[in-house]
Image (cartoon, rainbow, N blue to C red):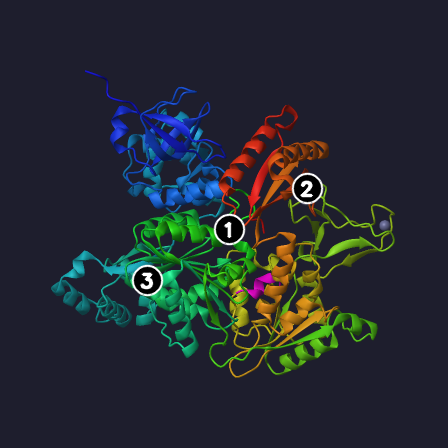
Amino acid sequence: MSEPLATFVHVILPLSLPKLYTYRVPQELTKQVLPGKRVAVQFGKRKIYAAIIHSISDKPPKEYEAKYLLDILDEDILVTPQLMKFWEWMATYYMCSLGDIMNAALPASFRLESTTQIQLNADCDLAALELSDKEYLIIEALTVQDELNMEQLIEIVQQKNIFPLLKSLYVKEAILLSEELKETYKPKTVSCIKLTSTYEQETALEELFKQLEKQPKQTDALLAYLHLQQQGKDIEKSELIKKSGVSESSLKTLVKNSVFEEYKLRVDRVNNNLNISETFSLNEFQEKAIEETKIHLKSKDVVLIHGVTSSGKTHVYVKLIEEIIAQGKQVLFLLPEIALTSQIVARVQKYFGNKAAAFHSKYSQNERFELWHKIKSGEVQVIIGARSAVFLPFNQLGLIIVDEEHESSYKQNDPAPRYNARDASIMLGHIWKCKTILGSATPSFESYYNAKIERYGLVNMKQRFGEIDMPEMITANIAEETRVKTMKGHFTSVLFNEIERAVNNHEQVILFQNRRGYAPMLECQNCHWMPKCTNCDIHLTYHKYINSLKCHYCGYSQKVPQSCHACGSHLLNLKGLGTEKVEDELNIYFPNARVARLDLEATKTKHGHEQIIKSFEKHEADILVGTQMISKGLDFEKVSIVGIINADQLLFFPDFRAHERAFQLLTQVSGRAGRKNKKGKVIVQTSVPNHHVIQEVIHQRYEHIYANETEERKSYQYPPFYRLIKIIVKHKDYKVAQDAAQHLRDLLYKRLGEHIIGPESPYVSRIRNQYIKEMLIKVERNATYLNDLKKFIREQVFSTQTVTEFKRVIIFADVDPM
Ligand SMILES: [Zn+2]
Ligand SMILES: [Zn+2]
């Protein structure tokens, strides 16, 4: 009799490894191994990881002896076949490892590893848990020491594979895992009230009423309870108090007398029991857009909806979503930054109720863990999320919508995978054989180009929704007003007068100040010395609220110096104009107006942005000053004026997309002006009012700017006509970085010739003590050799890194950089 064949699995480890790693499957587990399942493995001397089975084989690896895998962690597969296909495509296209994708794709609670910190869940009633001996050992250890990592626990229970124990304790909610600790995670519960079993019988209840005859308040509480009970659901304590009008102490007495008992009900973290309440009717333009979209979808995989701001695109999406979920399928609805689009999320959730859920980076790991399962089972049908939602384990994906598709926040810059969720979602649609809809008021030139050459269907929505006119747009000349001395602070007289008029009329104002290039910095009046970061090649920015200087790249901060470090002068001035400064000036010039600010600093807390937006919605502030954050998806009833403090910086940024971005941003910000029956006004402050981009914005000539800019890009070989691959080389020694980059360039040149540009130092040439060199590779759009070329590049990168002096040089590629 021959021995049964050994089984091996190739696994994806949560590490940036170029290859898969192979393990041998113990005989007793062979029947359970399946691609996509999670397994526990040992890698390196003593590190243990949760890995994902990529594939199964009966051949041992040639180069090393395969270790046995320790255990299979779940009964079901975690990574579905479609998801695995998507991971593979992404690793190839964006030139990274499957481990990089795994790290980006899986919620941290699926990625247990040796250094994962474990802590007791303080909210858990340990006494009520049934624990095995080993589980008990872990719990006991954790009551003595606040926090232990997996390696320490392995020592304690004397068992290498402790995944099953941890998993069981995790499911019982007895422990918390490292990433949650930072979030001081607490399961949400509400107090509920029910009758004790004694009074479930009618006779006992009648008896009780007699006993309580002289206790009118308690009787009220009991009556209110019985009334609420008819609804057939759990009765929240707060609801009962409200309904009966009795005090908490009366309720307490009833609990003490064993009439009522109190219990905790876990509120589902993901679903907030929203009810479907919103209905709306579409106007003729929206109806038309839906019809056109459907016609295009018959022959095209992707449709681009080009709809002006406030054209009511969301309603169009909602109707299309409705049809898909009626077929029992799921819809992925992507938004650029979910935190900033709370209004849209609320609208969609109101409409679809429990069938919709938002996937949020600010959710705790547990919330994400729960949502993951609800999506996998198909319980949640509409998933609203930011870019990382493309990694969710859909059960039956039927449609993808990418709203504000032009937004650069769809692109992840660091770490790998450096993917663009818009482009990735088209591939995801391909894998699921479903359609993708892109929407924007200012489509990216790449997407518009694809529509023009009829690769995508194109639907135009040129009317605003609900009797709202397009705002009137005018320029205000900063240079001219500075010359004739009519500027007040940073406000031209034109903008100043409009703000004054609006505030006096009880209307609201939004002021936009670009983030880029306008951070306030300190400068010596005599010698123009400016404090720089010690780790990066960048000037420090001034932060008023902490009165210190900070580096935006590495987080380094220092106190504000008393004098110039170069010439010793004490005359240090603030240069640049941040949102804080605008806020200060408004407080001086408009002392009676209430001013709010929406920027990164103001929204550091979990619900910071929501609070600011809600309060502005309620007209608790008259003027909102903000950065790019205010450009997205916000609709306010009473905003009549939008002011752009300075448009110039946007125009002269050294990037081939600068004009496209300026047009998009200025148009989006302008879209916040104008409400029902009231034409809004937008004032663009600039020193170059005749600059062609400003003129295109003022006259809203999208087609025109698209034609001009793409003409130029064609001749300079830029997207959409060419694809770009950026190669980034980093090292803490300038010369090593330079030499490695040059070495790699020479290797690439052999095949690419003039299609490779550089190496050059980027605008910020040193970050976190690492010097940076960049090269740009241009590839013809329709090149069939793209995958082959990427393979070639990876090989040359690898070859460079094997040179002794370049061993520690960091080299990576950024495909389709933004
Ligand atoms: Zn720095
Ligand atoms: Zn000086």
Q: Secondary structure at mark 3?
A: helix
Q: Residue at x 72, y 44 (%)?
A: 537
x, y percentage for residue 95?
A: 51, 40
Q: Which residue is mark 3?
A: 324
Q: In front: 471, or 616?
A: 471
Which element is circle 2 on? strand
User: Where residue 189 sits in the image (x, y, percent)?
Assistant: 36, 55
Dot 1 or dot 2: first in sequence order is 1
Residue 94 is situated, as x and y percent measured from the top left of the image, at 51, 43
Magenta segment, which residues? 626-632
What is the quadrant of the N terminus in the image? top left
Q: Disc 1 beta carbon < 8 A from ligand 1?
A: no
Q: Is 400 rendered above or below residue 622? A: above
Among the two numbered marks 3 and 2 on one chain, the one whose residue lies closer to the N terminus: 3
- What residue lies at 63% left-to-right and 56% top-to-bottom? 713
Label 3 or label 1, whichever comes before in sequence order: 3
Q: Residue at x 69, y 62 (%)?
A: 651
- The Cα atoms of the two marked residues, 3 and 2, are separated by 48 Å
Cα gap from disc 1 to disc 2, whole angstroms? 24 Å
> What residue did someone put label 2 on?
758
What's the residue type where badge 3 is placed? Answer: Ile
Mark 3 Cα within 10 Å, few/some/many (few <14, many 20+)?
A: some
| Pointer 1 residue | 420
Q: Which is nearer the eye, 280 or 248?
A: 280
- 101 vs 771, left or right, is left
- Confirm or reject: label 2 Cβ below 8 Å from ligand 1: no
Report the amino acid beneath label 2.
Gly
Q: Nearer the viewer, residue 52 or 626?
A: 52
Is residue 590 among the parts visible in the rendering? no
- Label 1 amino acid? Asn
